[in-house]
Image (cartoon, grey):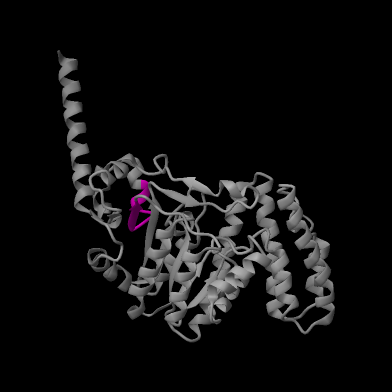
Amino acid sequence: MKQAVILSIIWTFFLSVNGQENELLETNSFFIQDISNSKFVDFIKPKIQESQFVFLGEQHGIIEVGEVTTLLYDIAQPFGFRTLCIETDAVAAKTLSSFLDVASPINKAKEFEKKYPFTIPFYNNYEDFEMFKNVSKLEGSLWGIDQSLMTQFRYNFDYIINRTSNKKLKDTLIPLREKAITSYKKAIEEKDFMAPFIFQYSESIHQGLMSLTNDSVEKEIIEQLWKTKEIYEYNFNGKYYLNNQIRGSLMKSNFMNYYRKASLLDSLPKVVFKLGANHAARGLTRTNIYDISNLCSELAIMNGMESLHILAMGISGVQRLANPFEPSKTLHTINENKYLPEEFMALTGKSDEKYLVIDTKALRPYVNKLSRKIKQYIFKFDVIILIKDAKPLTSF
């Protein structure tokens, strides 16, 4: 009898706590069918206004993420945001920017993709170019702070060749570019992941190139390629912590290079970031590093402002994956149940509307009433946007 009473008390307590948790989630969330709905705009605008940095942590490969980014960038304009920072290297960001200066940016991008396929990660699609065109229309700029892609050697060599006045460097790079092009073709035709030129780029080749130029821009491009090789080698050798740690450090360093230059013209540069969700999360990431988001969060605080961290993730629908080795397998059905708290998933079922917006920052005072998995999210992100029936990006 005594045991039954104890079990009854425990069960009653569990139901009470669970009920409080559900009530908190429902009170601090809302549904909308259109992301540009005034309810969302009115909700997010004051959060942007108090921020120096706005992070959009994305699920790659879905149309809705670019639409959310464009909306955030537009809302941020009156508050002095002029930069969109993306998950490419600086050469790719400059190249994307150059496409926006011609009469038909998409045609220019398609020509580039045909010549150098799978060179610029994530942005060989129609929808994201509409996002870039919007940044250009508003006289904004693109920053690229990530590593160069492992298949990017051929283009970065070409980039230097077409801009340098250094004949010796150019003559040395031309055969290396051709090797890189041939290696990429071999990788695709033979489905050989180890064929790209990154595996042939030795320290002797690298040091030889560095010795041929005193130009700081050329040296930086070449040095970034060596850093890319280092990062990928950690991954290939199963040293995943170092892979992520060195990559994260590189992103911070590259960001600060941009930031210091921007600070010469603007005492408080403001930036919208569009990065993979892990890079945009506060605190220790799933890869056990403190990523670029932490640097910017602390920097904003030192400048008397905030940073806003938003997660945008599809919970159903289809995303497009980049897979040059198996083009027929680029569409992937979304199922994020294993990552998201079950309480979030249950909440999405309370409406047929497309977007669920959760004000996770508002939940922090009630942390002791929330499940362990919810706690993991409410301190990493200030706002979570869950998307039903996500649509895949349309590749060129």
Q: Residue at x 46, y 62 (%)?
A: 293
In-front residue for pair 96/87: 96
Q: Is residue 225 above or below residue 82?
A: above
Image coords of residue 6 (percent x, y): 18, 21
Residue 304 appears in the figure: no
Chain part drawn in magenta? 376-387
- Placement of the N terminus among the 4 image quadrants: top left
Answer whether residue 381 is magenta in the image: yes
- Residue 252's quadrant in the figure? bottom right
Answer whether residue 360 is magenta in the image: no
Q: Residue at x 16, y 15 (%)?
A: 2
In-front residue for pair 96/290: 96
Image coords of residue 109 (percent x, y): 58, 70
Farthest-out residue, top: 1
**Side (left or right) of 319 relative to 28:** right
**Side (left or right) of 85 relative to 178:** left
